[in-house]
Amino acid sequence: MQSDNPTAAILVIGDEILSGRTREGNAHHLAGVLTATGFDLREMRIVADDHDQIVAAIRALDSSLGGAYDLLFTSGGIGPTHDDITADAVAAAHGTTVEINDEARALLQARCDRMGVELTPNRLRMARVPVGATLIDNAVSAAPGFSIGRTHVMAGVPEVFRGMVDWLIPRLPGGQPAQSLSVEVRRGESEVAEELQALAAEFPDLSMGSYPFHDERGWGTNLVVRGLDGERVAFAMSELKRLLKL
Amino acid sequence: MQSDNPTAAILVIGDEILSGRTREGNAHHLAGVLTATGFDLREMRIVADDHDQIVAAIRALDSSLGGAYDLLFTSGGIGPTHDDITADAVAAAHGTTVEINDEARALLQARCDRMGVELTPNRLRMARVPVGATLIDNAVSAAPGFSIGRTHVMAGVPEVFRGMVDWLIPRLPGGQPAQSLSVEVRRGESEVAEELQALAAEFPDLSMGSYPFHDERGWGTNLVVRGLDGERVAFAMSELKRLLKL
């Protein structure tokens, strides 16, 4: 698919994904949001709660550090415990250090006051933010995410992550949302390969995907046409249906 | 967690994951299998159906090519259509070319004979395998995966992927399976941070994780202790419960 949309990557930090304990869902959610708002998501990475690994991934992915993509979104590792090392790793990648952010401290203090609890040193850890970062709003539990360079750092708890995405994405300059149409056929992938290839040659500006599946009725394939121009996508889909005699 | 287990990475190839259309499940499944069989999964990557991106990822991840991990497993992009480019990319990364593999052709021919259909050029595409690769059995639909160097290439269709994993993993030299114990507490993460840090200092050979969640009853945290020695893990968990007065 040809596109001038900003490119993006997602970095998920979490041993619990790599151990198989938790199935990744935050990157999946953000992927759908990015596609709908005109960002071209090119890569997801999931790494362990390991300082050097996180730093290396950020440098490889954030274009402001010489990395590959216009924007980088991260999920996970910004809570109050000893294994929450994302803020330090992001700071190191961006060549800065972490400080107690005054605005973040005020947000946490206000929440503690409302709940009638003390802002303990552990709770205050959630105000540790790289010097020079701006905050990302947390509508669920006050502890903010933050943006530095082209890296946007969000929480791992799904409700909090989604709230941060809802706040952040409309504030970023997006591009043209991708359009897609799909059709399910009860044929194996090799029985539609020729038609799909002919279509791809006829519409080099669009992307064609075929996703085989297997269920109780046997093999089928979902065919998806994607592009930025909705009319072109619709035209290509009607052409595909004609080729497949649907 | 200290471990001499072989390290591993998973590379998923698929635009449909990056567009948000499909939620990744194959890497999640394999992650659980690897943990249970003594491999130390350190990274997952999901990249687009893009030749250069796949080649770069394989080189970065497969230690036989100077990459970071002992073993690399891939999922996706080995079907019969024009967008199935994994075999070519794997061959390029490993400095070889793709050929019609005789053994794979025989498997496909036998299946076509059983089904009374012709081995068309599109179906024969599924026998395209890098020169020097060995095959991975496909119990579901005959079209094989393959291993070359330390890269193990499997299908994207979940049933087929799982079948290939079941065949492949017992044939690889694994290590010591990781053991883990977990406990759920109805407290926020910052209310257990201190105890967890004390425990981590006392058991440097184990890994401690805290995974906050939010449900209709409010905040809770899952605490997980992981390690290779089951007795140590059990001892650390009882120590944690004592510290938390559970």
Image (spheres, coloured by chain):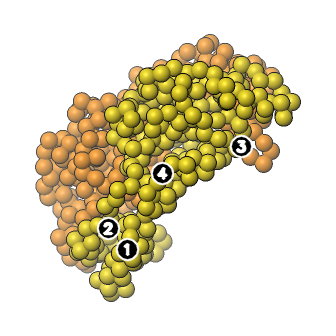
Chain colours: A yellow, B orange
Identify residue type, mark 2. Answer: Leu
Q: Mark 2 points at which residue?
A: A206
The quadrant of the image that shows the C terminus of chain A is bottom left
Residue B175 position within the rendered picture, expressed as x and y whole percent measured from the top left: 41, 28
Work out how far the residue at label 3 is from the one at label 1, CA to CA, in angstroms: 39 Å
Secondary structure beneath dot 1 equals: helix
Q: Which residue is drawn at 62% across and 12% down?
A: B202
Are dots 3 and 1 on a single chain?
A: yes
Q: Name the residue under label 1.
A: A233
Identify residue type, mark 3. Answer: Val
Question: Is B233 or A96 nearer to us in this picture?
Answer: A96
Are dots 2 and 3 on a single chain?
A: yes
> Dot 2, how many residues are within 10 Å of its Cα: few (below 14), some (14-19), or many (20+)?
many
Work out how far the residue at label 2 is from the one at label 4, CA to CA, in angstroms: 23 Å
Q: Which chain carries label 1?
A: A
Pointers 4 and 3 in contact (C-beta within 8 Å): no
Work out how far the residue at label 4 is from the one at label 3, CA to CA, in angstroms: 25 Å
Q: Can residue B67 be seen in this view?
A: yes
Q: Which residue is drawn at 25% across and 67% down?
A: A204
Identify residue type, mark 4. Answer: Pro
Pointers 2 and 4 in contact (C-beta within 8 Å): no
Q: Mark 4 points at which residue?
A: A173
Whichever of labels 3 and 1 marks the residue nearer the N terminus, that label is: 3
Pointers 3 and 1 in contact (C-beta within 8 Å): no
Q: Name the residue under label 3.
A: A140
B21 relative to B10 in the view: left or right: right
Q: Which chain carries label 3?
A: A
Q: Mark 4 lies on which chain?
A: A
